[in-house]
Image (cartoon, helix red, strand yellow):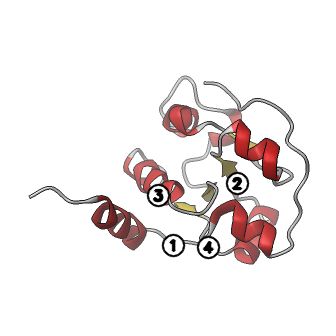
Amino acid sequence: MAANLDDLLAAARGRLARVGPEEAATLVAAGALLVDTRPIEQRRRDGEVPGAVVIDRNVLEWGLDPSSDHRIPEAGDPDRIVILMCNAGYSSSLAAATLQDIGLPRATDLDGGFQAWAAAGLPVVPARGPAAES
């Protein structure tokens, strides 16, 4: 029997050491990579987190895969903590589990996504422009 989306989400989250906004900020300050997967429309509307790397969800795996010729320079160390951030913390959970599957064992996501970050009063700046392309 096929799993439904709720089952997939629960299974993904069961594998992740999800972090809240304050813990994410602390980890980023210590060298973790924060990756914003939100579409440009959401970033223009709500802003961005300073220092976050923007990678559209549809090219995320290529941009972060340790074996990909298209990975971004920040993705050179497969043991680096990678924190994915979507708008509310749902698609980022599924994507983080996929990143673990392709060789990033410390991939996780921001519980509550960008909305939780902003609600916690952490820094937000106006959107910079289009997402990175791989």
In the rendered structure, find residue 34 and report the number of the disc placed on it. Answer: 2
Mark 4 / mark 2, whichever is N-terminal: 4
- The residue pinned by badge 4 equals 19
Tell me where residue 39 appears, x and y as whole percent.
66, 40
Mark 1 / mark 3, whichever is N-terminal: 1
- Gap between marks 3 and 2, in whole Å? 15 Å
In the rendered structure, find residue 105 and report the number of the disc placed on it. Answer: 3
Q: Determine whether, in the image, residue 1 is placed left or right of residue 80.
A: left
Q: Secondary structure at mark 4?
A: loop
Q: Determine whether, in the image, residue 127 is placed left or right of residue 23.
A: right
- The residue pinned by badge 1 equals 17
Q: Badge 1: how crowded within 10 Å, few (<14), some, or many (20+)? A: few
Nearest-to-viewer mark from 3 and 2: 2
- Mark 4 and mark 1 in contact? Answer it, CB < 8 Å: yes
Q: Is residue 56 above or below residue 7?
A: above
- Gap between marks 3 and 4, in whole Å? 15 Å
- Mark 1 and mark 2 in contact? Answer it, CB < 8 Å: no
**Of the pair 92 and 26, the residue shown nearer to us:** 92
